[in-house]
Amino acid sequence: MNAMLSMVRAQTSGGATALALFVAFASVFFLAIGSNPLAMLAEIARSAWGDSYALGETLLRATPILLCALATIVPARAGLISVGAEGQLYFGALAGTGLLLASGAPASAWMLPAVLLAGAIGGALWALTPALLRVGANANETISTLLLNYVAALLVTWLVYGPWKNPQSQGWPASIEFPMEARLPLLWESRAHAGLLIALVLAVVLHVLLTRSRWGLELDLMRSNPRAALLAGFGQRRRIVLALLAGGLLAGLAGIAETAAVQGRLQADLSNGAGLSGFLVAWLARNHALRAIAWALVVGGLLAAGDGLQMNANIPSSATLVVQGLLFVAVLLASGLRDWRHARAGASHG
Amino acid sequence: MAEAGIFDGLVVSSIRAATPLIYVLLGECLTQRVGRINLGVEGQMLVGAAAGYGVAAASGNPWLGLLAGAVVGSVLSLVYAVLTVPARANQFASGLAVWMLGFGLSAYVGAGLVGQHVEGFTPLANGFTPTMVLALLLVPCIGLWLYTTRTGLAWRAVGESPDVARAAGVQPALVIVLGIAAGGLLSGLGGAALSVDYTRTWAEGMSGGRGLVAVGLVIVARWNPWWTLPAALLFGCAEAMSLRMQAAHSAIPAHLLHTLPYLASLAVFAIACVRLRDSGAPAALKNVLER
């Protein structure tokens, strides 16, 4: 009981340290660019969650980020650091659009689920190469997933400038528009879409699977004791591949949901950095699927606020990218300092 | 006039395309030698490219641009140093945080650079520019330094075993911070070489994964500065070929050709990893890479 209490205390003090560091870093940045830190933080909060329009934009931005965070969390539970959500998102969008184009877009109620499924499978396919390289060549998955991100984005760019370009779009590189049967419905009066509901349901399902199922237990074992898991048998490789593929499924879904709802057609640069933001959210949530929901709303809100900042405060929207980076640095620094204090406390006993 | 063949002068074009990467590779090589993997080189390149371009445009002096790139690259790398040395945070996550921060900072600063013009360097003989010559000179300098000097030995010792190095009177933490800062300096320089000399323009995210490629290619080069040159030339050659085939109206579309440098890097990375176990990897790194 005492141990639990002190753990809770350590967790909250870690959070407080991170928050204090973040506010300090962000204030220094705002002062450096000649703005009032308090006014800027208030403006960001208002632009992110202040009214129903802002909230809709935040939910819109948070959707692919949450899915990409889940795509990072599943491999992370097995001790793998995948940064491939960005590429899987692109390839998912590509695969879903490909199915739509290949089918000749017949009006059918099956169109939307088929397109979404194709997107998810596309994301998993993109995760297959790093997964096989990891188990076959012992190639570090962080580096291979990062390199493949650029390849997937280039493939989408090639298609929308070339073979899949809509001839009616007059120079603008994009595929044909998705028919209404293949579009995800919008939520309320906003641009947020049903992809958000899918992401929320998946977060809950994954949380249950990761914490309650045999599969989740096996992943935990792999992470906490790779050698013991290795001795436990031949299933290790299969589990590594499956964890990475499951991540790919989730990120692929993020990509096709963006395409089939927000943009309504395949375009270059569709991710808007959701992959890396998703990685940050996974880290903030410490690979906990439910906590990722809250953090996706925070990070999504921060990024959505960039546009408001540009309009209302005449500050380039890239300022929120800096703030996002500072948030990541603050959290790593705080958790590092906490572990260090623990280690020192442990060492003084020994 | 005779039609220019697709292979004419390919060596010089490859060196030109490889030059920014040579700096970054040398820098990341030193960082990994002291036992740290810094994915943040991508962000350090970006701030180097933005600062270098801004200073070169404002001062009219490309050398000042290179200097500015090197300075901001090292400053940003200190963030990574703080995260991974005293705070002991996860190396991959710390690198990604620095990348994210560098991307944001360079995009913020770079928004004011669009439309500005830099003079660039006056080319030397045979299409060589000063940044290319400097990069080619740095390879033997750093190679000799690492393998023949006492400080080089101390750096290698820290990467092998911080405890043994400490017993030999070396301060591992100081050497690690210096190794990270050297990586920051060289990646910032590489970023500036990219914007001031190679492309002579600034664009958001213009490093296009070169820093991440460098992290993989250092492993291909077996943490040996001498081998970073062929590794960088492989990427440079793939990039030069893709540009040439594009100019020659190849049947393969340009965007597909641009995947070539990444796929080539991934292929050699995977091949190098197969034999990683019995290679000359700094011992402190193996735990990070293989877990």
Image (cartoon, coloured by chain):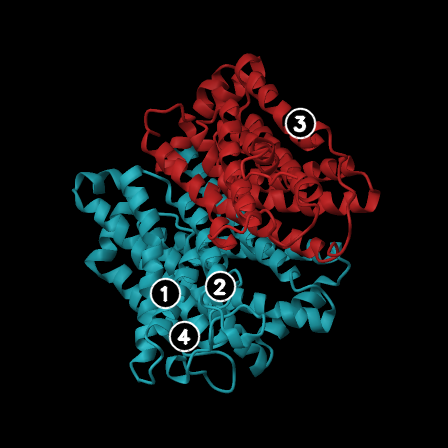
Element class at badge 3: helix
Labels 1 and 3 positioned on one and the same chain: no
Q: Is residue A2 left or right of residue A267?
A: left
**Of residues B59 and A50, the one drawn nearer to the viewer in this rendering:** B59
Q: Is residue B74 left or right of residue A138?
A: right
Q: Residue at x 55, y 69 (%)?
A: A301
Q: Residue at x 50, y 56 (%)?
A: A15
Quadrant the C terminus of chain A occupies = top left
Please state the chain letter of the residue tagged with numbered disc 1 in the rendered image: A
Q: Amino acid at mark 3?
A: Val
Q: Which residue is mark 3?
A: B133
Q: Which residue is mark 1?
A: A95
Q: Amino acid at mark 1?
A: Ala
Q: Colour of chain B?
A: red
Return the x and y of residue A194 as percentages of the image width and height. 41, 79
State the residue lying farthest toward the left: A233
Which label belongs to residue B187? none
Q: Which residue is mark 2?
A: A162
Q: Which residue is mark 4?
A: A195
